[in-house]
Amino acid sequence: MTTVPLSQRLRTETKEAHTTAERSGIMRDLLRGTIAIPAYVALQQNLAALYDAMESEIDRNDTHPALRNVNWNAVRRLAALQSDIKLLTASDSSSETSAHHDSLVPATRQYVAHLHDLGTRAPELLFAHAYLRYLGDMYGGQIIKRILLETVLPPNSRAVAFYEFDQIPDLHAFMVPFRGSLDSAALSEDTANQMVSEAQLGYALHARMFEELAAP
């Protein structure tokens, strides 16, 4: 029996959850180009909290067999997010580049705690969350960048660093070894199943976060 590559399983077995997330709450407004800048900043602040947790845990576990074969420096997004937030809040002296604790919705706080927990007890499962975030930034993020520049942000805005991967000249070419690192990680069947469950959980938490950010 042929074993289905884990990257393919992640793509097919999370398709429904992925679609639900991108149609939820504030993300629906963003894709329609109807999001207000303060709401977009709130979204970026919540994403910054996620990336802070995920990237710090990946850094802490960068010698783990499931994580050590990826050039994480090329994909990390936290600094770019902080740069965009700073540009978008430049006229507000009370704003900071990092996410305020009070700006985080409950789903984000739950997700952050979960990522730190994984970093302690099951670092290999961090790859599932990195997979859905970074590949989403490389694929859908390019569409979002265009929407932002055309309909949401002021003319000539530079607050789109989050969607730009300066260290990766060819995003599509980079995705091949990225997926390959996941497929060649020699994970057990049980761990592979947990990886799929983690990705599904990640999308569910994203959907909740998007809905909570859209709530009055």
Image (cartoon, rainbow, N blue to C red):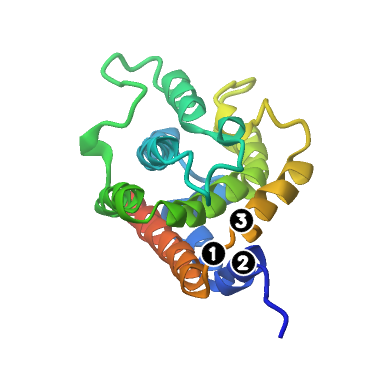
Of 198 and 14, nearer the camera is 198
| Residue, disc 1 | 187
Left or right: 7 with respect to 34? right
First-in-chain label (2 vs 1): 2
User: In front: mark 2 or mark 1?
Assistant: 1
User: Tag 2's secondary structure?
Assistant: helix
Q: Amino acid at mark 2?
A: Leu
Q: Amino acid at mark 3?
A: Leu
Q: Pointer 2 and pointer 1: residues touching (CB < 8 Å)?
A: yes
Tell me the crowding category of disc 1: few under 14, some 14 to 19, or many 20 or more residues within 10 angstroms, Cα based: some
**In the image, what residue occupies the spot 26% across and 31% down?**
100
How far apart, in angstroms, are the residues tagged by discs 3 and 2? 7 Å
How far apart, in angstroms, are the residues tagged by discs 2 and 1? 9 Å
Q: Pointer 3 and pointer 2: residues touching (CB < 8 Å)?
A: yes
User: Tag 3's secondary structure?
Assistant: helix
Left or right: 37 with respect to 72? left
| Quarter residue 114 falls in | bottom left
Q: Farthest residue toward the bottom? A: 1
| Quarter residue 40 falls in | top left
Q: In x, y percent, where is residue 92?
A: 33, 17
